Amino acid sequence: MKTLANSEKDQAIEFAQKKKEKLLEELGCASVVASTESTLKTIEAAHMETIVSELDNNGKPIYSNAEKRQAELTRRLDNNKTYQDYKRIVDEHKTKAKMCSIEATYCSDMIRILCAFGEANRED
């Protein structure tokens, strides 16, 4: 019967627990990213609505084509502290989620290594 030595088994269990924690943390980050991106889209839509409705003194749209509207939206969002704060939150959580994924993969690799090491060193 193939079994791991107690030390390898304990280490494998620790890595499995850490992997679970990292995957749950990654899931939490993904949730924050999704909700924050939704907030960003709401802010963008509100600004675009304002931009589209702005008229000059003759009653004509100030931003007459899509390219001008997009440029103005970009300018306003770049100067909007709340929007930039939310964007920073998205970026930070995407980075954190990626790190969690890398750590979870590392834990999986370590579990496989410990199991292989245990099998190679077992006594029949």
Image: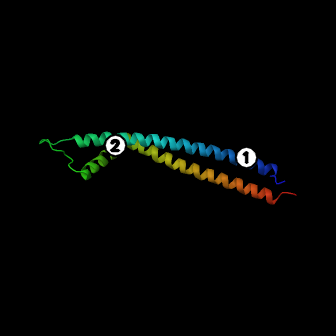
Q: Residue drawn at (45%, 40%), measured in percent from left and top?
A: 35
Residue 57 position in % (x across, y down): 13, 41
Q: What residue type is disc 2 on?
A: Glu
Residue 100: x %, y % from top left: 58, 48
In this rendering, position of residue 55 left or right of residue 67: left
Could you classify mark 2 by the number of other residues whose Cα lies within 10 Å: few (under 14), some (14-19), or many (20 or more)? some
Point out which mark residue 13 bears. 1
Quarter where residue 87 is shown:
top left
Q: Amino acid at mark 1?
A: Ile
- Identify the element where label 2 is drawn: helix
| Residue furthest right in the image | 124
The residue positioned 79% from the left and 56% from the top of the image is: 118
Q: Where is mark 2, residue-wise?
A: 44
If you read the primary sequence from the N terminus, does the residue marked by circle 1 or circle 2 appear first? 1
Q: How many marks?
A: 2
**Label 1, label 2: how many angstroms apart (C-alpha)?**
46 Å
- Tell me where residue 43 sits by quadrant: top left
Q: Residue at x 73, y 49 (%)?
A: 12
Q: Position of residue 115 (x, y in %)?
A: 75, 55
Q: Is residue 69 above or below residue 46?
A: below
